[in-house]
């Protein structure tokens, strides 16, 4: 058996080697001829998997070590009896930590106080739920918008309750309609899949009308797909002062991104919000398990998660609990370093190649649970709780 594995999937060789020859490949630019002898194909989001790639090949299983699936033609796979698995939720915590770190940086460097502000989370799947948990630990109020999930909750309530379904609170189920969310939010964080059709398409969801609904200068973070934002509308909103701060991990036209837009953002990064070591290895683990189930292999594989070189963070008698919380977050994740690497790469002769190189060679980043906060005074109950809710271990 020949198993083709994207070179950006950590421990890809180890995860599949027991069941055949593993062949590493660069995710962008893969062709049908490349995989003419492949039995299984394991990809990430930069590889479009459809008839153009697979027709006439012996590929029997496709796995993507990502949450998103918009790069996979699942209908084609079903029509050909090709097995498929994604990795739902694998890097949700990683993205939640990215949003936490970006907001903490804005708080520290731009004076954008978080306590008591309202964050609107657009898309309340695995990632949105992690963002909510951490936002509450930052002292934020949370609004959620997710029409597909709202509709599913409504349908389930009706099925369960019949004529008495109103007792289930049909109408919002804890969700806020998008216009109201935009009007009430100080911060917007986008976590939707890229969909082109259906009742709630997300292609250019953030269009001119979207930005016109903002009632105050707003912080906007996008960590899902660049095409969810209408770039011209975003630039116009920035010109009009509707966007106060901008954080972008994803861009239209990746890997070649708009230098003007990148230059206007407060923080930029090369589509790596979900690139923590744990997030990537979770994806490897999930797709490897699905591969084994599909082919009927009665084996198991699990990665060993290494610890950070400095896993302890000591309480240092800061000026305030907020200052120490900021210190812990910045100690765990150096997001400004990601920003600098991408900005520097835009000066290279081929920024597109540089963008992919930054993703391929991304340094090891450990998630907050890998760090233990020590010597926090027992009387600091609120601080201890907030650090624990962010995901840190508090000794």
Image (cartoon, rainbow, N blue to C red):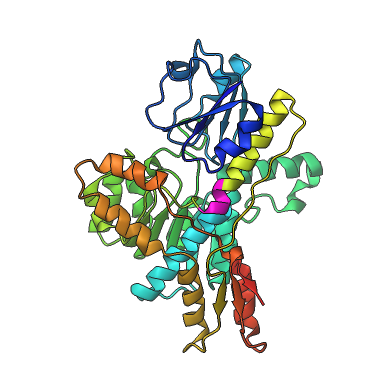
State the image coordinates of residue 17 (x, y, percent, origin top left). 61, 32
Residue 186 shows in the view: no
Q: In this view, does 226 lie above or below 18?
A: below
State the image coordinates of residue 176 (x, y, percent, origin top left). 55, 55
Q: In which quarter of the image is residue 155?
A: top right
Q: In which quarter of the image is residue 188?
A: bottom left
Residue 245 shows in the view: yes
Q: Is residue 162 above or below residue 264?
A: above
Residue at the spot x=34%, y=39% of the render?
254
Q: In this view, does 195 lie above or below 137?
A: above
Residue at the spot x=48%, y=55% of the render?
364
Which portion, as a residue range, is magenta? 276-280
State the image coordinates of residue 100 (x, y, percent, origin top left). 49, 64
Residue at the spot x=66%, y=41% of the render?
152
Left or right position of 355 against 333: left
So how many labels did they put on this image?
0
Q: Nearer the viewer, residue 1 or 286?
A: 1
State the image coordinates of residue 160 (x, y, percent, origin top left). 80, 42
- Residue 46 in magenta? no
Q: Nearer the viewer, residue 48 or 288?
A: 288
**Which quadrant is home to the C terminus?**
bottom right
Magenta stretch secondary structure, dominant: helix
Q: Is residue 243 above or below residue 138?
A: above
Residue at the spot x=67%, y=87% of the render?
378
**Which quadrant is home to the N terminus?**
top right
Q: Nearer the viewer, residue 125 or 167?
A: 125
Left or right position of 8 against 59: left
Q: Nearer the viewer, residue 87 or 156?
A: 87
């Amino acid at each position: 058996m020949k198993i083709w594995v994207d070179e950006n999937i950590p421990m890809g060789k180890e995860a599949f080697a027991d069941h055949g020859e593993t062949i590493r490949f660069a995710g962008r630019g893969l062709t049908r001829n490349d995989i003419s002898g492949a039995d299984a194909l394991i990809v990430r989001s930069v590889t479009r998997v459809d008839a153009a790639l697979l027709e006439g090949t012996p590929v029997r299983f496709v796995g993507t070590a990502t949450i998103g699936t918009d790069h996979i033609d699942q209908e084609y796979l079903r029509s050909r009896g090709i097995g498929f698995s994604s990795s739902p939720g694998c890097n949700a915590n990683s993205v939640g930590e990215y949003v936490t770190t970006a907001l903490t940086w804005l708080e520290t460097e731009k004076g954008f106080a978080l306590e008591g502000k309202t964050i609107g989370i657009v898309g309340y799947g695995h990632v949105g739920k992690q963002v909510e948990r951490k936002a509450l630990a930052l002292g934020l109020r949370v609004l959620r918008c997710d029409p597909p999930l709202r509709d599913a909750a409504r349908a389930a309530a009706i099925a369960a309750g019949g004529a008495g379904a109103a007792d289930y609170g049909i109408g919002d189920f804890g969700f806020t309609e998008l216009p109201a969310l935009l009007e009430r939010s100080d911060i917007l964080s986008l976590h939707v899949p890229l969909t082109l059709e259906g009742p709630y398409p997300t292609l250019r969801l953030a269009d001119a009308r979207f930005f016109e609904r903002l009632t105050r200068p707003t912080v906007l973070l996008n960590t899902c797909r660049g095409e969810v934002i209408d770039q011209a509308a975003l630039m116009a909103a920035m010109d009009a002062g509707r966007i106060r701060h901008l954080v972008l991990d994803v861009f239209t036209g990746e890997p070649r991104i708009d230098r003007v837009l990148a230059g206007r953002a407060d923080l930029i990064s090369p589509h790596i919000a979900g690139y923590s070591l744990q997030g990537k290895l979770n994806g490897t683990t999930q797709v490897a398990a699905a591969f084994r189930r599909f082919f009927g292999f009665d084996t198991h594989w699990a990665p060993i998660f290494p610890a950070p070189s400095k896993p302890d963070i000591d309480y240092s008698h800061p000026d305030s609990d907020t200052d120490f919380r900021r210190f812990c977050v910045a100690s765990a994740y150096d997001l400004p370093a990601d920003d600098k690497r991408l900005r520097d790469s835009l000066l290279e002769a081929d920024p597109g190649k540089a963008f992919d190189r930054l993703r391929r060679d991304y340094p090891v980043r450990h998630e907050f649970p890998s760090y233990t906060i020590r010597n926090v005074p027992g009387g600091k109950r609120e601080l201890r709780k907030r650090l624990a809710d962010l995901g840190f271990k508090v000794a």
